[in-house]
């Protein structure tokens, strides 16, 4: 059975482009995989809390030494990591906010980068532990940040996500960008076409 995890992160609960594209992706994957099990998490409407001193302290406390209070504090973080572990396919919806991530998605990143769990330190450096999964990141950007664009260098969203996902072992990542959505629907249509091609199993020539 194929396990799908979708993460949306727009605080716009009614007219989010990135959320609509993730839903389209999920619909296509349901048709492609008849035995699909789907877990959904909305990080925009229900964002994880920002890390505080107590949470960070609990992260670095051995599991057999956690107090009941610490166990409760990191309960959500544990749940988020377990969702990642269970997933075969992960689809992340990421609207660009101020050249980077929406705050709910950034908070999720902080909760799933767990030393000793999703990554570990070795004599050769850090090693990600969540390997062998397919990840798709669907972005929506008001401007056009493609490689050919004069503002490409302002894109701190895709490079950051690629780095942190690889850090925990998620290195099979395909980006689908809806570019220039503030100027019209051309970028949305292009992203929809790319999603449809992927879910139909066609070669993807636009991945970045």
Image (cartoon, helix red, strand yellow):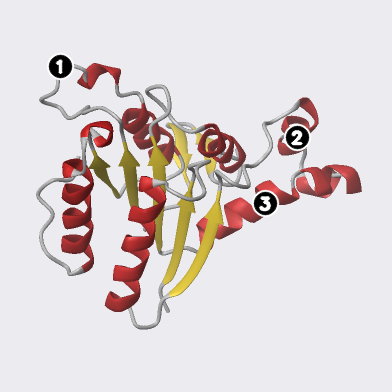
Q: First in sequence: mark 1 or mark 2? A: 2
Which image quarter: residue 90?
bottom left
Q: Give the mark, 3 or 2, whose residue is nearer the N terminus.
A: 2
Q: Is residue 204 above or below residue 178?
A: below
> Which residue lies most toward the bottom here?
34
Judged left or right of residue 39, residue 137 is: left
Q: Position of residue 95 (x, y in %)?
A: 39, 38
Nearer the observer: mark 3 or 1; the answer is 1
Label 3 – label 2 distance at C-alpha: 12 Å
Q: Which mark is residue 71?
A: none
Q: Secondary structure at mark 3?
A: helix
Q: Is residue 2 visible?
A: yes
| Residue at mark 1 | 150
Residue at 48 percent across and 50 percent down: it is 14
* Contact flag, marks 1 and 2 (Cβ < 8 Å): no
Specify few, some or many for label 3: CA neighbours under 10 Å numbering under 14, 14-19, or 20 or more.
Answer: some
Where does the image place residue 204, in percent across and percent down from the top left?
13, 54
Q: Nearer the viewer, residue 205 or 142?
A: 142
Residue at disc 1, secondary structure: loop
* Disc 3: which residue: 78
Q: Residue 189, position in %: x, y?
A: 18, 50
Q: Quadrant of the N terminus?
A: bottom left
- The answer to whether 170 appears left or right of 60 in the picture is left
The one of 29 and 182 positioned closer to us in this rendering: 182
Q: Which residue is mark 2?
A: 55
> Callout 2: helix, strand or loop?
helix
Q: How many marks?
A: 3
């Amino acid at each position: 059975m194929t396990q799908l995890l979708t993460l949306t992160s727009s605080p716009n609960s009614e007219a989010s482009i990135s959320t609509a594209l993730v839903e389209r992706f999920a619909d296509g994957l349901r048709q492609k995989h008849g035995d699909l099990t789907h877990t959904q998490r909305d990080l925009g409407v229900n964002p994880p809390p920002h890390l505080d001193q107590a949470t960070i302290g609990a992260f670095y406390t051995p599991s057999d030494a956690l107090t009941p209070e610490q166990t409760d504090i990191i309960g959500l973080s544990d749940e988020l990591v377990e969702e990642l572990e269970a997933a075969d396919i992960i689809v992340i919806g990421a609207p660009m906010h101020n050249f980077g991530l929406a705050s709910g998605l950034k908070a999720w990143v902080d909760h799933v980068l767990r030393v000793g769990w999703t990554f570990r330190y070795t004599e050769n450096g850090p090693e990600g532990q969540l390997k062998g999964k397919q990840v798709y990141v669907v972005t929506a950007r008001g401007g056009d940040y493609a490689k050919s664009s004069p503002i490409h260098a302002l894109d701190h969203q895709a490079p950051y996500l690629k780095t942190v996902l690889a850090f925990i072992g998620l290195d099979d990542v395909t980006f689908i960008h809806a570019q220039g959505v503030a100027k019209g629907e051309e970028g949305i249509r292009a992203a929809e076409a790319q999603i449809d091609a992927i879910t139909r199993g066609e070669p993807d020539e636009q991945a970045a």
